[in-house]
Amino acid sequence: MGFLDHIWLGIVAVFSADPVLTIAGIPISITITMVFSGFLGGIVVGATPGLGGPFAMAVSLPILVSIFGFDVDAMLPVLGFLIGIMKGATLGGAVPAILFNTPGTPDSLLTTFDGYPMTRNGQSGKALRVAHFSSVSGDSVSDIVLIVGAPFLAVFVERFLDFPEKAALIILSLAFIAAVVGANVWKGLLAALMGLFFAYVSTGQDNYPRLSLGIEELGNGFPVISAVLGVLIIGEVFKALEDMWREMREKAEIAEIEQSGDNKLHWADIRRILPFIGISASIGTMIGALPGIGSTLAATLGYATGRKFYKGDGNFGDGLPEGVASTEAANSAVSGANLIPVLSLGIPGNVAAVFIVLATETISGFNPGPDVFRLIPNQVNPEMVIAFGLFTMMIFANVLNWTLGGVFMRATGIMVKVPKQRLLPIVLLLTLTAIYVQETNMFAIYVTLGFGFLGYLMRKLDISVLPFVIAFILANRLEESMRQAFDATGSNPWFLFQSPIAVAFILLAIGVTVFFARNQKALG
Amino acid sequence: MSRDRWTIGLAVFFAAFAALTLGVWIPNDIETGVIEKFRRQISIGDAMAPTFVAAAMLVVGLIMGVLECVRPGAAEGRPRGLDGSAFKFVLRLGGLLVVSLLLMIYVGPLTVDVINGLGHDIGTYRQLRDTVPYKYLGYVTGGFVLVFGVTSLVENRFSRASGVVALAAVAVLVVLYDVPFDDLLLPPNSDQ
């Protein structure tokens, strides 16, 4: 069966499997319902300062697994909900940035530069409409690149890369993520090495669980969900709680500003912002395709490029729709492209992708990587059907974004009034409960809190947590690739230096590290 | 430009940890070597990956420390690190977490013991861990203390509103995780 057959099966799997309700005589599948629910939840969570897409993905995963189980049939509904959250949260993050000068997500910080001045000028409605249009445009461009690019890249990887090259590619990805994330390359590398080290505890091939110090509970290693959620979510909660504790509620009251300006988005406005959307969407897509570089850098580059390109009256920062468009198109264009390394190489490039990988590891039947797009003669490759189902859900979420996203987005402004100091302790209990119901033992909670404190310390010492998390997830694959490469090359200890491609990857890993180490001040 | 003591401290910590791991931990806590030979077949042993990682940690730690000594970065933008206030916060938060987890684990079993001690034979907590109201005792008490305690710590005061919010939050989580699912148990009931 060819690619087109798999695409069709993917579409059918999304739209027709397990209908749960009927609207105007049309049966609506469970997967579509889940994308829609995740999308709505994502907008609300994105619009709530202190929360964000990754948090919602983290706490919903165990609930979703409880509802749908571990069987392959659960894959599309669960991924659909996560994709919905990812898309919705990207959109929702702009709301508090524009209305209250409070970025809902880190990448919305630059949206405040022009979005909030527009609100002060009485044009919050227009600012939200520009943000919506730009965000959805950027996201759509990025998804198209993902859908077209990922299968080809995967086929290329499968055809030209053998075990030694795949091991070298993982090393290159980790070096790249460690080098580009955060202010200090060496701290990034140490974070990645820590992630690898923790992942190697109690794994391996021998009967004795290595490095377990004889602790019985560690017999199966640190639970992945505990380590990932601990460092990513609990660490962030601890840090935010400490910041608020220091501030002691010195928060100014939010003043209501009368919105009496032009709040419509006209064709003339769209024509004005389209070139900025085009530039920023391209920047965001390119950056998103590289593992580790997040939407914050994309938003920064998009905004800086837009400012350079702008020749009209006024300046960026004074409340220009072009400023909002440049930022929102760039940071939203990252989300789709970030799945390119996941689907083609099996390497998660950002936090949202980490949760997609966690879902696929929890539920059986879909292992993101180059094998997904392998054609099997006269047979259906079920993983390819799921991959095209994933693309279908992304397109459907984009349709929701275009049609309903703006309305829901404008309705979530109230979320900024939720007091963060009351929300974050609930997030803490919610995350611990979510982990417990999945792991079913208190040890997982202790491990989560331990990794939470580690994540808190890393943030206090300016060590990026992303290299840690991605290294933790990739550690066992790296070791497995090494073992297979060693065996495949007849126990050659220099297997990483046998083929020109593997050598090139290793040299590139060293080059990236040295380059960013030498230029970190200038880049910072 | 002055040296950043936190960066140097980190470098020393990682270098020392890596050296100890290479010299003591790995040789004593992994049963296969870096390379294993079995019936003339050579394969990678369980010690290889941790050894490479620890060695790389040692090298990176040393480079980071030496670079910070030789070429210190600008003072602005440096992490504040852990000051006295941070330690105070971590101790208070840690204390709250310990108390709430202890309550979560022991309130249920202790209540059952007390009822049994009063002469009512209701069985063991393990037998009752999926029965209302016993299954909620630990989670509700520990969860409430966790949410209310952390909120009060951050707000630096106890307020009725945060108590109500904490209670409502725990109730919502019970409804979310326990009521719809027969096969899910709230903490700490699965491992009782």
Image: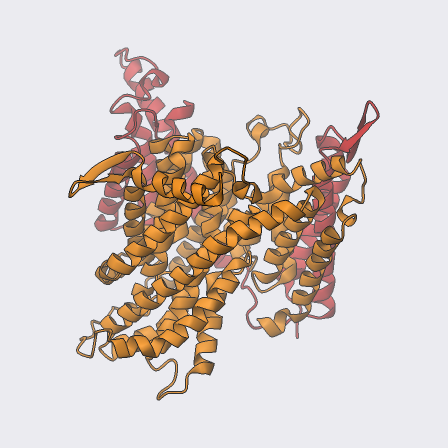
Chain colours: A orange, B red
Check the picture and name the quadrant holding the C terminus of chain A: bottom right
- Residue A37 spot, x, y in % from top left: 28, 46
**Hey, which residue is sitting farthest bottom in the picture?**
A313
Left or right position of B159 against A161: left
Specify the quadrant of the image occupied by residue B149. top left
Left or right position of A344 against A229: right
> Measuring 44% from the left and 49% from the top, which residue is drawn there?
A233
Left or right position of A187 against A100: right
**Can you say whether A65 is above or below A268 in the image?**
above
The answer to whether residue A108 shows anywhere in this view is: yes
- Residue A264 spot, x, y in % from top left: 21, 74
Specify the quadrant of the image occupied by residue B147. top left
- Tell which of A279 and B20 is nearer to you: A279
> Measuring 30% from the left and 75% from the top, which residue is drawn there?
A270
**Can you say whether A89 is above or below A82 in the image?**
below
- Residue A110 spot, x, y in % from top left: 40, 71
**Hey, which residue is sitting farthest left in the picture?**
A24
**Hey, which residue is sitting farthest right in the picture?**
B40
The answer to whether residue A424 shows anywhere in this view is: no
**Can you say whether B11 is above or below A307 in the image?**
above
- Tell which of A356 and A336 is nearer to you: A336
Report the number of discs.
0
Left or right position of B174 against A477: left
> Measuring 25% from the left and 68% from the top, which residue is drawn there?
A253
- Residue B125 spot, x, y in % from top left: 34, 19
